[in-house]
């Protein structure tokens, strides 16, 4: 059996119930064959066995008291995946679906993504099965404080620097940072995504969505094209979806859909983003409220966002939200580019169908790397006790996304599959991180 298949089988045997983790490992490892076959040292050094195994996995309970005085207990995780390029770095997800499989798949993807940024960032991921939706500010604060009362032992500005993710925005990061500073009696850049008044970076809020659109724009430019006049379908209506929509609109494209876990909206005239920001960022409401307020806009319950006609699709909600049938529908409707804002939103079968039909498919570990890259820039500003202007951070973000696009394209060509960004991203990310692992010995 080929070395790669053997390691995939080992992962399946060891963690048979971790479906998302197995999916991510299978997707990445399956694309590494040319690079593994070209150098026997990878197998001799057991690089694949080491890269699939987190350096450390921490699980802990988080008890907290609701407004009525009732005690609740959530389960929390921090998976410190790989630190050979820098301190562990990756977000904290607060969502009822969170389990070890999901956190491990996200941490594993983060290894390659952070490597692609070329910044000094290791990889990790964490979170809890706590749902901030429908909770009062007081309840969220008490949860975040107790979450940090355990997590603080395992993190620091030089060890592990968590950030936001689904359910963890500026409010949650603020509560966690306050608790860390209090118990450690130290002010340091231990979290990114902080508020601007206490060490946050300008353009961090926008970075993942903007970076996604910069990446796609590089691809369009390489074909003498641009966003002008393009129709774009976006899923989700959280941080990534909102700022991807904003940048598409700035570049002349028209976004016609958004969604949340309840359903999706279609506005043929183009999404009115000020209204979406008011509903989602200010009132913490549901995307269905948009259709109540905009003449000509439709709301559909459930899945179906990928049935809208579009030139470009940007899945920006969650994992496994673009399935095989959705991919078929996108191809039938003439969609030419699918770029992932979310982590692993496209299933393996859907990805294969898109690529086989000539759709330019941009995997999240490359196209959504702008978020973590700008978190890296926030860390640099915190260590230097300085703060850069919005334009400076945005220009660095654009430069980083341009470099990632070039590197991914070049790697895909070098390994005989030009334009296959899945192969390009996995190989380019793999090479940098494993060079560092080899240089640092068996540790
Ligand atoms: P938010 O919490 O801000 O928004 C998430 C959005 O996705 C919401 O609209 C939410 O709807 C929707 N959603 C979540 N779960 C589901 C589900 N099971 N089915 C349908 N819709 C769902 O998160 P972000 O925008 O920050 O993150 C979105 C994705 O981008 C995630 O995959 C994340 O890992 C990835 N990402 C985020 C980065 C960042 O900087 N924030 C960086 C890189 C990747 P609802 O409100 O109904 O739950």
Image: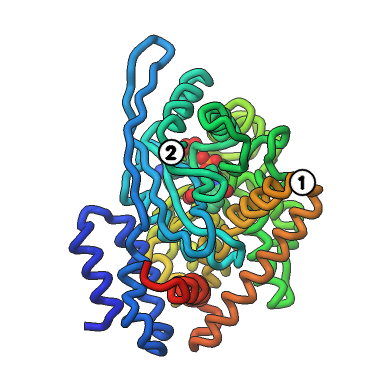
Which residue: 40% across, 16% down?
A: 66
Residue 206 visible from this viewpoint: no
Which residue: 41% across, 52% down?
A: 80
Q: Secondary structure at mark 2?
A: helix
Q: Quadrant of residue 216?
A: bottom right
Q: Callout 2 environment at 10 Å: few (<14), some (14 to 19), or many (20+)?
A: few
Which residue: 32% across, 26% down?
A: 73
Mark 2 touches mark 1? (CB < 8 Å): no
Compare residues 383 and 71 and report the one nearer the observer: 383
Q: Give the color scheme: rainbow, by chain, secondary structure or one colour.
A: rainbow
How far apart are the alpha carbons under marks 2 and 1?
Answer: 27 Å
Residue 115: x percent and y percent?
A: 53, 66
Q: Callout 1 environment at 10 Å: few (<14), some (14 to 19), or many (20+)?
A: few
Residue 151 visible from this viewpoint: yes
Which residue: 51% across, 28% down?
A: 183
Residue under label 1, please give it. Answer: 386
108 vs 192: above or below? below
For residue 223, side relative to residue 174 (left or right) = right
249 vs 197: above or below? below
Q: Quadrant of the N terminus?
A: bottom left
Q: Secondary structure at mark 1?
A: loop
Residue under label 2, please give it. Answer: 153
Q: Quadrant of the C terminus?
A: bottom left
Q: Quadrant of residue 253?
A: bottom right
For residue 373, side relative to residue 95 (left or right) = right
Residue 62: x percent and y percent?
A: 36, 29
Compare residues 288 and 442 and report the one nearer the observer: 442
Disc number lying in front (2 or 1): 2
Outermost residue to the left: 13
Would the CB of label 2 be found within 8 Å of ligand 1?
Answer: no
For residue 370, side relative to residue 86 (left or right) = right
């Amino acid at each position: 059996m080929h070395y790669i298949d053997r390691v995939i089988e080992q992962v399946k045997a060891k963690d048979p119930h971790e479906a998302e983790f197995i999916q991510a490992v299978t997707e990445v490892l399956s694309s590494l064959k040319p690079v593994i076959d070209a150098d026997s040292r990878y197998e001799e050094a057991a690089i694949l066995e080491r890269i699939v195994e987190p350096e450390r996995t921490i699980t802990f309970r988080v008890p907290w008291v609701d407004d009525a005085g009732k005690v609740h207990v959530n389960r929390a995780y921090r998976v410190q995946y790989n630190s050979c390029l820098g301190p562990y770095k990756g977000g904290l997800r607060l969502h009822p679906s969170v389990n070890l499989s999901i956190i491990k798949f996200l941490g594993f993807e983060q290894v390659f993504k952070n490597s692609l940024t070329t910044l000094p960032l290791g990889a990790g991921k964490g979170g809890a099965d706590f749902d901030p939706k429908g909770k009062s500010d007081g309840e969220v604060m008490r949860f975040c404080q107790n979450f940090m009362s355990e997590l603080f032992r395992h993190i620091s500005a030089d060890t592990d620097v968590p950030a936001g993710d689904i359910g963890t925005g500026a409010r949650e990061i603020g509560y966690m940072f306050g608790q860390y500073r209090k118990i450690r009696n130290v002010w340091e850049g231990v979290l990114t995504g902080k508020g601007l008044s206490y060490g946050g970076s300008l353009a961090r809020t926008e970075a993942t969505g903007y970076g996604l659109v910069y990446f796609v724009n590089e691809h369009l430019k390489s074909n003498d094209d641009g966003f002008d006049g393009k129709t774009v379908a976006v899923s989700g209506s959280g941080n990534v979806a909102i700022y991807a929509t904003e940048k598409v609109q700035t570049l002349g494209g028209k976004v016609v859909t958004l969604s949340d876990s309840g359903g999706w909206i279609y506005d043929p005239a183009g999404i009115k983003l000020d209204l979406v920001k008011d509903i989602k960022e200010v009132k913490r409401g549901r995307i269905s409220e948009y259709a109540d307020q905009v003449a000509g806009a439709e709301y559909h319950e459930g899945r179906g966002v990928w049935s809208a006609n579009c030139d470009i699709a940007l899945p920006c909600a969650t994992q496994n939200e673009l399935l095989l049938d959705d991919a078929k529908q996108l191809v039938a409707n003439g969609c030419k580019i699918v770029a992932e804002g979310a982590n692993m939103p496209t299933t393996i079968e859907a990805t294969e169908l898109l690529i086989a039909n000539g759709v330019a498919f941009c995997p999240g570990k490359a196209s959504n790397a702008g978020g973590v890259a700008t978190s890296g820039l926030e860390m640099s500003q915190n260590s230097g006790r300085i703060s850069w202007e919005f334009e400076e951070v945005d220009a660095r973000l654009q430069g980083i996304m341009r470099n990632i696009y070039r590197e991914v394209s070049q790697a895909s060509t070098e390994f005989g599959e030009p334009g296959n960004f899945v192969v390009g991203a996995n190989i380019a990310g793999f090479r940098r991180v494993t060079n560092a692992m080899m240089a640092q010995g068996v540790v």
